[in-house]
Image: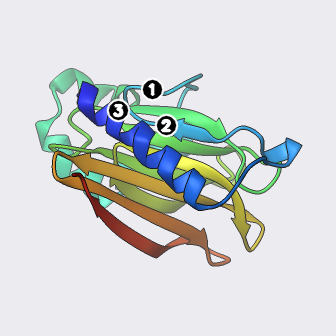
Amino acid sequence: MGIHKHLIGLVLAIVIAAQGRTSLPVHDEHISIWSEDNFPNPVPVPRPVLILLLQDKTVKDSMDRATESERKNPAQLFRAAEIHLRSANEIDLLVVGMTPIQGADNSWFWVVRSAYKNPMIVLFTTGYSVEVMPSRTNGYRNLLSAWSNPNGTETRIYKFDGARYKLRKETWREHH
């Protein structure tokens, strides 16, 4: 797992450098990078969001691997962090699944818009990390997911289309 963290950091540094950014506006200064292993300031998953997650097909398919205790208290299968996709006064969530709600070699992430008012899952993606980027499309921050293996790194950029996040660019870079 240590090599993966190193690779993720390297990939994200390359992506940011490739974007030609030398400084960011003050309100977008903090670029958030999340993974199962590095998930700062977790918050409880609100019940309406938990209900949405438990209806998701990937979650339903994984619940047969959950223990009896996990099935009785499914909130323990997720970590959530508050993010701001559009503005500082709108609270959204980035949620990551914990074992068994994840892939064999990657984490599963959900982005939930309006987490405390009228929650809606606007993205499901996999990888080792998700970055909330300073750039925006239709007023919402763009998102980048990254996944690595010993052969290379895959990055995916998602942009908001007015209703949901859609994959806009996918790249694979081989490790040399």
The three-letter code of the residue at mark 1 reads Asn
**Left or right placement of residue 27 versus residue 45 in this view:** right
State which quadrant residue 55 falls in: bottom left
Figure coloring: rainbow
Residue 77 point in image, percent of width and height: 33, 31
Pick the quarter of the image with the N terminus.
top left
Q: Are marks 2 and 1 in contact (CB under 8 Å)?
A: yes
Q: How many marks?
A: 3
The three-letter code of the residue at mark 2 reads Trp
State which quadrant residue 93 falls in: top right
Q: Residue at x 85, y 49 (%)?
A: 25
Q: Residue at x 39, y 57 (%)?
A: 125
Element type at mark 2: strand
Nearer mark to the viewer, of 2 and 3: 3
The three-letter code of the residue at mark 3 reads His
**Left or right placement of residue 58 versus residue 84 in this view:** left
Name the residue that disc number 1 marks. Answer: 38
Name the residue that disc number 2 marks. Answer: 34
Q: Please determine whether, in this image, residue 20 is positioned above or below residue 171.
A: above
Residue 113 point in image, percent of width and height: 64, 55
**Distance Cα–Cα, label 2 vs label 1:** 6 Å
Q: Residue at x 46, y 51 (%)?
A: 110
